């Protein structure tokens, strides 16, 4: 019952469906091509990503190619994003970025060494 109430109150209106995709409350939506909004979200947390990468050199934000994403409704929105950060096949990262209802974004997790064909999964 609680999940049904949350879904009814927090799922977006139909005009936002292009950004939110076909989302299930609690689950992730379908993988979609990156939008300008998602690119801006990645850019807003890129310094955090570079810090989290540790010794691995990450490119300047201008060189990052944000490719695909999924979303998940929580007490805000989780964005699961695939980005290309180099020229090699394994030069992709998956980012989990939390965007609160206040609009603030935080990098919650990152997976490095991903390939272009790797699906975006919950992590």
Image (cartoon, rainbow, N blue to C red):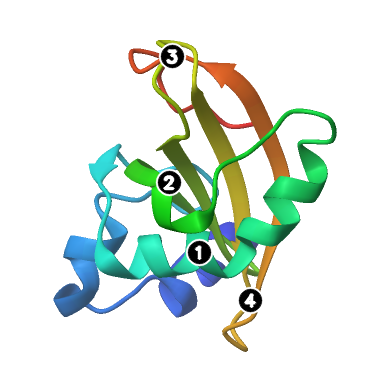
User: Which residue does the numbered mark 2 point to in the structure image?
Assistant: 64
Are circles 4 and 2 on residues that touch, CB within 8 Å?
Answer: no
Q: Quadrant of residue 111?
A: top right
Q: Which residue is mark 1?
A: 43
Circle nearer the viewer, 3 or 2: 2
Which residue is at the front of the view, 67 or 60? Answer: 60
Q: Residue at x 74, y 57 (%)?
A: 48
User: From the viewer's perspective, is 75 left or right of 19?
Assistant: right
* Front in this rendered view, residue 79 or 53: 53
Is the residue marked by circle 4 packed among few (<14), some (14-19), or many (20+) residues within 10 Å? some
N-term-proximal mark, 3 vs 1: 1
For this rendering, which residue is in front, 82 or 23?
A: 82
In the rendered image, the vertical position of residue 40 relative to residue 48, given as above or below = below
User: How far separated are the C-alphas under marks 4 and 2?
Assistant: 24 Å
Give residue 83's mark.
Answer: none
Q: Position of residue 67 (x, y in %)?
A: 31, 40
Does dot 3 land on a helix, a strand or a loop? loop
Q: Which residue is mark 3?
A: 115
Label 1 and label 2: CA atoms lie apart by 9 Å
Residue 34 in sight here: yes
Horizontal and vertical percent position of residue 46:
61, 57
Name the spot of residue 25 as percent of width and height, x first.
Answer: 47, 54
Residue 66 shown left or right of residue 91 in the figure:
left
């Amino acid at each position: 019952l609680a999940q049904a109430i949350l879904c009814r109150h927090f799922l977006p209106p139909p005009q936002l469906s292009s950004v939110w995709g076909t989302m299930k409350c609690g689950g992730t939506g379908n993988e979609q091509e990156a939008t300008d909004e998602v690119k801006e979200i990645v850019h807003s947390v890129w310094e955090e990503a570079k810090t989290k990468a540790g010794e691995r050199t990450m490119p300047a934000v201008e060189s990052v190619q944000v490719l695909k994403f999924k979303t998940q409704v929580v007490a805000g929105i989780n964005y699961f994003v695939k980005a290309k950060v180099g020229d090699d096949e394994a030069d992709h990262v998956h980012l989990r970025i939390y965007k609160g209802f206040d609009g603030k974004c935080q990098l919650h997790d990152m997976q490095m060494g991903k390939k272009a064909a790797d699906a975006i999964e919950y992590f």
